[in-house]
Image (tube, rainbow, N blue to C red):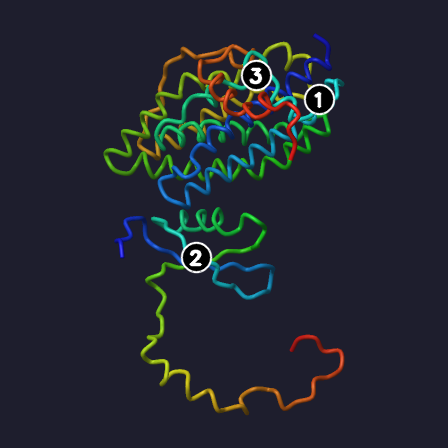
Amino acid sequence: MTQQQALYKYCLRLGDNALVQSYRLSEWCSNGPILEEDLALTNFALDMTGRAQALLTYAGKIDGNNKTDDDLAYRRGEREFYNILMHELPYGDFANTIARLFYSATFEYLFFSGLMNSTDETLAAIAAKSIKEVKYHMAHATDWVLRLGDGTEESHRRMQNGISENWMFTGEMFEMDEVETLLAGVSVVVSEIKAKWLSQVSKVMAEATLTLPTDTYMQTGGRNGIHTEYLGHILSEMQYLQRAYPTATW
Amino acid sequence: MATDTQLALWEVFLQAKSGANYIHAGSVHASDKSMALQNARDTYTRRGEGTSIWVVPSDAIVASNPDDNEMFFDPANDKVYRHPTFYVMPAGAKAI
């Protein structure tokens, strides 16, 4: 693998995380518990689509095949998507979505804080823009974890289920392989932010009267294109128009 | 009218830029101050409308009764001398 190929894959992984996460959150449109939360979740989805667009546009430039962000979003098959598995799972109930957003936004806040210091100027600029958005996502998700965890019996049960069910998908956030190794200085050393993430997450769990699972078994595969059955369904809907009418424009 | 089963109502005021008046933008539902502020941010500042937000519990607002309109407002109608319209505006003054 060359440095260029590594950077391409790094951008696709980050871009796909944003794109697929955005897709799932946008499914809350018209389904939120209250109108205000409906807007909040779809706002987050829009933030993530913007981030995906920036990252996939950059990936297209690195690849040198004149691929656009649209080509990369709409014309790759599921084995060529590199998002982590957690983002593609069906969103479940509201607490499940919040648990996932809480895990990932807490991670992304640390991640983009690190990526702002990347030696790659484009990635550093994307990180500088994303960090403001992600900081808010984290604050919003954390508030809900506290409210639901330390709320009624039912909200506590649902929040605990969300935290437990998504736990085995958090390990993938901290995986590193030759892509990161080749991109020393450009990429974030995620293994180094794991302790901070765990301490932040644990702090919120304690305050929310929730229990963080201690299982060590973690799911893996998404970062290398091995997905759950759910991604195919996402893509078949997301890419339908582009696949059916390849030259369609508006 | 259907009963409002959602959370408590809050009124949202936005300041478009520093120093400007806070203007009523609408209302949101929320269970406490911090949720009200977040919901106001998500609902009313998506297009750069504001640089600062106030949220106020709707039941903290004391409103005049429309039945009192005659007593409250009509007496002001015929007092043109209360408007500063009898002065010549200095040339070049845009807003006073």
Numbered label attached to residue A67: 1
Q: Quadrant of the C terminus of chain A?
A: top right
Task: Say which residue appears at 60% left-offset and 60% top-offset.
Answer: B18
Nearer to the camera, A103 or A227? A227
Q: Chain of mark 1?
A: A
Tell me residue A108's x, y (percent): 54, 29
Where the N terminus of chain A falls, by quadrant? top right
- Give the numbered dot on residue A4: none
Q: Residue at x 66, y 75 (%)?
A: B95
Q: Name the image quarter holding residue A216.
A: top left
Which residue is disc 2 drawn over? B55
The Cα atoms of the two marked residues, 3 and 1, are separated by 17 Å
Dot 3 crowding, Cα within 10 Å, few <14, some 14–19, many 20+: many
Q: Secondary structure at mark 1?
A: loop
User: Which amino acid type is shown beneath numbered disc 3?
Assistant: Tyr
Q: Within the image, what quadrant is residue A116 found in? A: top right
Q: Between marks 2 and 1, how big is the CA–CA gap?
A: 46 Å
- How many numbered dots are placed on residues in this image? 3
Q: Secondary structure at mark 2?
A: strand
Label 3: which secondary element: loop
The amino acid type found where label 2 is placed reads Val
**Type of the residue with mark 1:** Lys
The residue to which callout 3 is attached is A82
